[in-house]
Image (cartoon, helix red, strand yellow):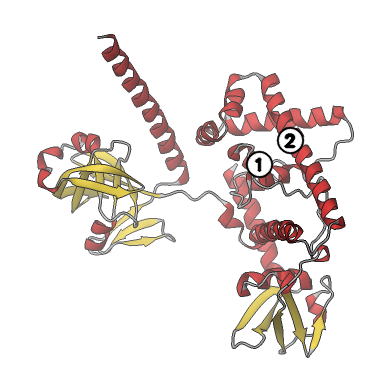
């Protein structure tokens, strides 16, 4: 599936790069700020404004474009016909004292919906946003959860209840195919939407259909409310401060959606889930997977792993304290010089032992600095130049397996702890 997605994206990226582009020198009027931007010739003036607002931090509706002392008003005019050449395109910031409805593109209901902050279950919504576009199923969407789900509805065109039921059945099948074949995604779904996850693994299709139907109905209901609200705004006094706030919020959501579209077109690789960096190391013949973390001040290891690596006999308890970061944990001591084996070569490293057994091993900044390490993302490796070591990072597949194992181990630990507490209670 991933190879299929990557091949589609590569094809898409190649197609985009083959289109003709033009360079434009842009100046923010009354300032010395010049920017040379590159944009496709087929773009419209509106698309150019959307692109420029990310550079100059000026909302597109407060942006006035001037070329050869002529104001460009038509948002649909193609930029290739502007005859820009070597001329400078000027931007004038015209702050809106009063925002009017004419500055907003009227939402198309039910296809183009902005729902605010309704929560429908993030993993489910992320999947549904890619149902009608398989190449985007693993994308992270920088929108509210309900907006993600609404993307799945954009191509929905059922005319009666029978067609709606058929649509729901298709979505149920695709949900099962997706999450039952991906333990990692299923684990995340259990955290974000346990009811949906339980319905998927239970094999009860009727229950799963009912949950999907509720979500579809919720989207439709929100779309109707949004449409009614929009119509009210069109008839309201647009000098009213409360109306101004609502219109500004619609514009803000519109800008977010346009920003997402830009990312999908020109930065599709950023929409994939990015995994952390892990390397394989060996300590006293014990194989260990270490997280490479430049944000960790020290290299740390949990007590349980230190015992498995037979290092606790070297733990200097005079260096006890509290480790703080994302949470806190008690420091049990420091191993001043532990021998690590990486790619058949040995290195001496300092390791701080902590009490929290959920941490595992983190290869931190202290040892990276002392060994002059380089993180090379092109090679996909952590380099130790002085020792001639190239420690390859784990692949995405290996990391997924690791996460599944960690989840199972955490469940087993929780069950073991519950049994121990139950036995203590009986005594």
Q: Position of residue 390 (x, y in %)?
A: 31, 57
Q: Position of residue 416 (x, y in %)?
A: 32, 21
* Picture residue at 80% right of the left edge, 83% below the top: 71
As displayed, is residue 252 above or below residue 78? Answer: above
| Image quadrant where residue 283 sits | top left
Q: Position of residue 295 (x, y in %)?
A: 34, 56
Q: Is residue 390 visible?
A: yes
Residue that carries the numbered disc 2 in the rendered image: 218
- Quadrant of the image containing the C terminus: top left
Residue that carries the numbered disc 1 in the rendered image: 118
Q: Nearer the viewer, residue 187 or 371?
A: 187
Q: Nearer the viewer, residue 148 or 425?
A: 425
As displayed, is residue 57 above or below residue 265? Answer: below
Q: Are marks 1 and 2 in contact (CB under 8 Å)?
A: yes
| Image quadrant where residue 193 sits | top right
Q: Nearer the viewer, residue 274 or 418?
A: 418
- Quadrant of the image containing the N terminus: top right
Q: CA distance from mark 1 to mark 2?
A: 9 Å
10 Å crowding of disc 1: few (<14), some (14-19), many (20+): few
Left or right of 341? Residue 315 is left
As displayed, is residue 333 above or below residue 240? Answer: above
* Picture residue at 69% right of the left edge, 58% below the top: 261
As displayed, is residue 384 above or below residue 192? Answer: below
- Label 2, secondary structure: give it: helix
Question: Which of the two labelled residues, at mark 1 and mark 2, occupies the earlier sequence position?
Answer: 1
Q: Nearer the viewer, residue 51 or 181?
A: 51
* Picture residue at 71% right of the left edge, 81% below the top: 92
Left or right of 82? Residue 151 is left
- Label 1, secondary structure: give it: loop
Left or right of 252? Residue 313 is left
* Picture residue at 73% right of the left edge, 49% below the top: 114
Q: Residue furthest right?
A: 159
């Amino acid at each position: 599936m991933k190879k299929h997605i990557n091949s589609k994206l590569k094809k898409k990226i190649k197609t985009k790069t083959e289109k003709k582009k033009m360079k434009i020198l842009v100046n923010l009027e009354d300032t010395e700020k010049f920017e040379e931007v590159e944009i496709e010739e087929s773009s419209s003036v509106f698309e150019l404004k959307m692109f420029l607002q990310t550079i100059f931090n000026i909302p597109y509706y407060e942006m006035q474009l001037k070329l050869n002392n002529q104001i460009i008003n038509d948002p649909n005019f193609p930029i290739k016909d502007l005859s820009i050449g070597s001329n400078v395109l000027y931007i004038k910031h015209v702050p809106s004292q009063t925002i009017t409805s004419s500055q907003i593109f009227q939402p198309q209901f039910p296809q183009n919906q902005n729902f605010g902050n309704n929560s429908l279950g993030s993993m489910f919504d992320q999947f549904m946003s890619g149902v009608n576009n398989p190449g985007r199923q693993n994308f992270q969407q920088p929108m509210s959860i309900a907006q993600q789900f609404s993307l799945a509805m954009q191509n929905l065109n059922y005319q009666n209840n029978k067609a709606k039921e058929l649509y729901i059945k298709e979505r149920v099948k695709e949900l099962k195919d997706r999450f039952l074949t991906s333990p990692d995604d299923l684990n995340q779904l259990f955290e974000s939407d346990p009811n949906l996850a339980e319905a998927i693994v239970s094999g009860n299709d009727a229950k799963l259909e009912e949950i999907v139907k509720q979500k579809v109905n919720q989207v439709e209901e929100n779309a109707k409310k949004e449409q009614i609200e929009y119509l009210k705004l069109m008839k309201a006094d647009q000098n009213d401060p409360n109306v101004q706030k609502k219109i500004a919020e619609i514009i803000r959501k519109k800008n977010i959606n346009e920003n997402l579209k830009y990312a999908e077109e020109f930065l599709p690789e950023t929409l994939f889930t990015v995994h952390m960096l892990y390397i394989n190391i060996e300590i006293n013949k014990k194989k260990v997977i270490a997280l490479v973390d430049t944000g960790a001040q020290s290299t740390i290891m949990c007590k349980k792993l230190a015992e498995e690596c037979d290092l606790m006999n070297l733990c200097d308890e005079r260096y006890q304290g509290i480790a703080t970061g994302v949470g806190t944990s008690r420091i049990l001591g420091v191993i001043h010089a532990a021998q690590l084996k990486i790619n058949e070569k040995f290195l001496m490293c300092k390791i701080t032992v902590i009490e929290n057994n959920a941490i595992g091993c983190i290869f931190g900044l202290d040892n990276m600095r002392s060994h002059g390490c380089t993180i090379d993302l092109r090679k996909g490796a952590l380099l130790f130049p002085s020792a001639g070591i190239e420690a390859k990072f784990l692949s995405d597949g290996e990391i997924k397996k690791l996460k599944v194992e960690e989840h199972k181990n955490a469940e087993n630990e929780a069950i073991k702890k519950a049994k121990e507490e139950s036995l203590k209670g009986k005594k």
